[in-house]
Amino acid sequence: MAETGDSNYSNLLLEALLARKDWLEQSDLARLKEELRIFQGAFAALYNIFLKKKLLHEDPYKQEARIGDLEVPETGPFNEAKRVEQISLRLSNYDNQLDFLVNFYQFGIDFFNLERVRRILGLVRYIDWVHLTPDSQSHNTRVVAEITAQSKVGVDQITLSIIGESLTKLSKTTGTVMGILRDMITYYKETYKLNIRNAITQNMSAGEVSVVNIKRKFASALPGTPFYQEFVDELIKEDYSKDGPAMQEAVLKSLKLVEEKPKAVKPAVDFKATLLEGVQVIGGSANTLTEIVGKIDENGTVLANRKKSFWEKVRLIIRQMMHSEPEDVIYEVQYMDATKGMPVKEKINYRQFRADMDKKIRIFTNLGGQGTALSKLGSMSEEQITSYLDRSIRELQSLHRTLGALDEFFKSSSAKEDREKIKGIKPELSTIKNSIVRANQFRYEYNAQKEEEEQLKRLGVSPTV
């Protein structure tokens, strides 16, 4: 590096970056993940309404999509003749990317880097939710604004409320997430420049330092690291120009943590209420499950009524004459195991599955606002309610997986002439998935509230009762 003082700046910069890293790990990453969960849940609710109102086409390959890493979907102009098909595919991909980000992506300072943070930023800004207008310069924003306006026509007050609430959450969380990501970009950018200082420029004289010379040594000094010329230009100006000291001071100031004094009193939080709201969300899936069983029963009838062989007809007549119980119907389905990353086959006894479904629907119905089960849960301990909510979420996730596999089974197993009779359940599955996401949000909110309470206790602050 250049003159005396540069090493002192590097030491101060390293100290600031280590403090910023601790802050990001202990505070901002958890907040980022929670805000992204809210963002994803709000979009999922809107996306499901768009599908139900037939404003978008269902993507037949949506459930089969495999994501290895985050990728921002297409943002270019549309072929106007195929605009609906193209926006349907883009939003299907967008929904999958957000789901992958929230439920499967690794959140860690050492895992993230400039490129990964920029991809998250690209997903958050993929549609301009803050300025969602039909005259937007963004092709996607413009079309989604038009679809959103159409989705409000002729809907009930509840749906209208969901649309409004979702748009508010998307706009609000966009600002919060972008603020966190900007801080993270600052951290990674300054870490990147410090690495260059330590690996390359500290061994060069001031006269040798240039973009060309740094780039020549870059690959061997920092293997596997992308070369960002704009950051190298900044480094050279900070360390070797007359404005360097002021620029260095600005960098240190941008990394400095602002200490917030804890408030003396914080209102007590009703933790049970948060958990019970999550339980109610699960209970709200009962109506959707009822719609689903009606459709899959009809699909089962279509398969059962397909042309039977002579011996199948004879066997059926004999069983009817002997008043025998109906034969078990076994469907062999296949689904993707997300934890193993491979397809799994499963045999489903449909009679038993339907009996279990009816039982589960009755239980979920009682979890509604006026349900008897909910009032009983209210008298239990937080630990018991948490355990019940966790179990209910897992059960609904299992149902979602099995129902999705059955949906694919009915479509693939029906005869060509019967396929138009098969009723798809993709919109209903999207609703169930949204319920799972929202219930999880209440669970995470509860955990965050409990953690905050513990931190306040350690600081000697007691919430009001």
Image (cartoon, rainbow, N blue to C red):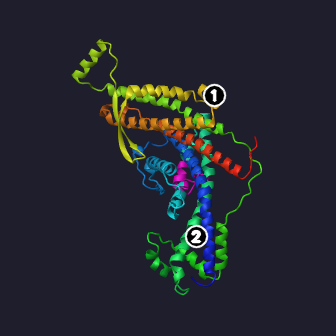
- How far, Cα to Cα, is label 2 from label 1? 54 Å
Query: Which residue does the numbered mark 1 point to in the structure image?
Result: 375
Q: If the image is split into quadrants, where does the N terminus sit?
A: bottom right
Tell me the element at label 1.
Answer: helix
Query: Which residue does the numbered mark 2 point to in the structure image?
Result: 190
Q: If the image is split into quadrants, where does the C terminus sit?
A: top right
How many tags in the picture?
2
Q: Nearer the viewer, residue 464 or 334?
A: 464
Q: Is residue 141 magenta?
A: yes
- Which mark is first along the chain, 1 or 2? 2
Tell me where residue 318 appears, x and y as whole percent. 26, 15
Tell me where residue 452 appears, x and y as whole percent. 66, 49
Q: Nearer the viewer, residue 148 or 452?
A: 452
Q: Is residue 405 above or below residue 320?
A: below
Q: Nearer the viewer, residue 328 or 290?
A: 328
Q: What type is the residue that disc 1 sits on?
A: Ser
In magenta, the rendered stretch is: 124-144
Tell me where residue 27 appears, x and y as whole percent. 62, 56
